[in-house]
Amino acid sequence: MSTALKTNRAPHQDDGATDRLSFLWLAGFMAAFLVVDILSKLTEYGRNGVGSEPVYFAIYEITSFVVLLALFPAIAWLTSRATPGQHQWPYVIGAHGAASVIFSLIHVGLMVALRKLAFMLFLPISYTFSDHLPRDLIYEYRKDVLTYALFVFFITFGRQLAQQRREIAAAREDAKRSKKLTLKCGGRSIWVDAKDVCWVRSASNYVEVAANGKTHLARATLAAIERQLADAGANAVRVHRSYVVNTDHIREIRPNGEGDVKIVMSDDQIIPGSRRFRDRLPKAD
């Protein structure tokens, strides 16, 4: 009756490709912030009449930047095993809470080592991280826990978007083969014959799909459903920014005298038709 949604790659392969893209976005975002931060500090010190070599600020920011990005793969690995929204929240919070402490300690340790090396190579002074280690570790952790959370967000959000794209692509392939519409309704997947779909309405992040006297609320965009219907061979057209109709189910089209129309469907539902989509409607014989 139905076909399973399939992808050509294993999930871990898809996550790897997605994580690389997330890494590039995150690196670009952090690099832009790094440049702004260095320039801002130079301006602030100059404004206060305190001179400082640009290399000093560059070393401070770049060493932290390099270590943070080097830790990205480890966070991606853990996120696969403690994914927000997929695993139990107490477990997710506990796992990432503990990992964020380790993340901060590793970040500080490697950052200090790189700074000591850079100071030795480029500056006539030595680098000292702290004169009060507990205080400064807490200071660094306050910043690092936010960075850690940002990493987890980028990884999780990127994977969710990629999964949605895979599901949409699989649904379109399924529609071409089976001539059925694949709908994600809550935790279920249901399949509806495309020819039986009467109309579809956008409802925020969902769509309402009317077919066979029932209305299904599915997690999808109107554009994605419109493409699925087209792939399944249904005569579906956009008639309004919020509506798609199956022209085979149109009973009557009523002009309102202002360019727009009212479309009476086979289930007696009246759908608004916008003038900008008027040319997509069937013409009277």
Image (cartoon, rainbow, N blue to C red):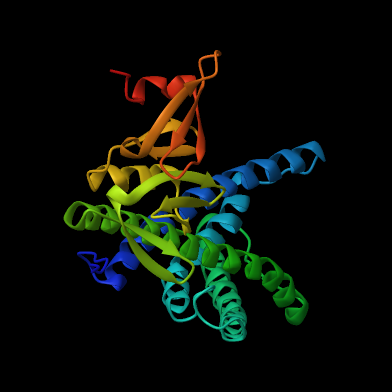
**Could one spot residue 21 in this view of the protein?**
yes
Q: Left or right: 127 with respect to 240?
A: right
- Residue 281 percent across, percent down from the top left: 36, 25
Q: Left or right: 17 with respect to 25?
A: left
In the rendered image, the vertical position of residue 145 relative to residue 78, given as above or below: above
Q: What residue is at 75 percent from the left and 38 percent from the top?
A: 46
Q: Left or right: 201 with respect to 266?
A: right
Quarter in which the N terminus is drawn: bottom left
In the rendered image, the vertical position of residue 133 relative to residue 246, given as above or below: below
Q: Quadrant of residue 92?
A: bottom right
**Front one among 239 and 23:** 239
In the image as oriented, which residue stretches furthest toward the left? 177
Count the labels in the image: 0
**Front one among 121 and 5:** 5
- Residue 11 percent across, percent down from the top left: 30, 71
Q: Left or right: 53 with respect to 15?
A: right
- Residue 156 percent across, percent down from the top left: 48, 65
**Could one spot residue 123 in this view of the protein?**
no
Q: Quadrant of residue 119?
A: bottom right
In the rendered image, the vertical position of residue 34 relative to residue 139, given as above or below: above
- Residue 200 percent across, percent down from the top left: 44, 45
In the rendered image, the vertical position of residue 281 relative to residue 153, given as above or below: above
**Front one among 110 and 250:** 250
In the image as oriented, which residue stretches furthest toward the right? 48
**Front one among 53 and 249:** 249
Quarter in which the C terminus is drawn: top left
Q: What residue is at 68 percent from the left and 70 percent from the top?
A: 140
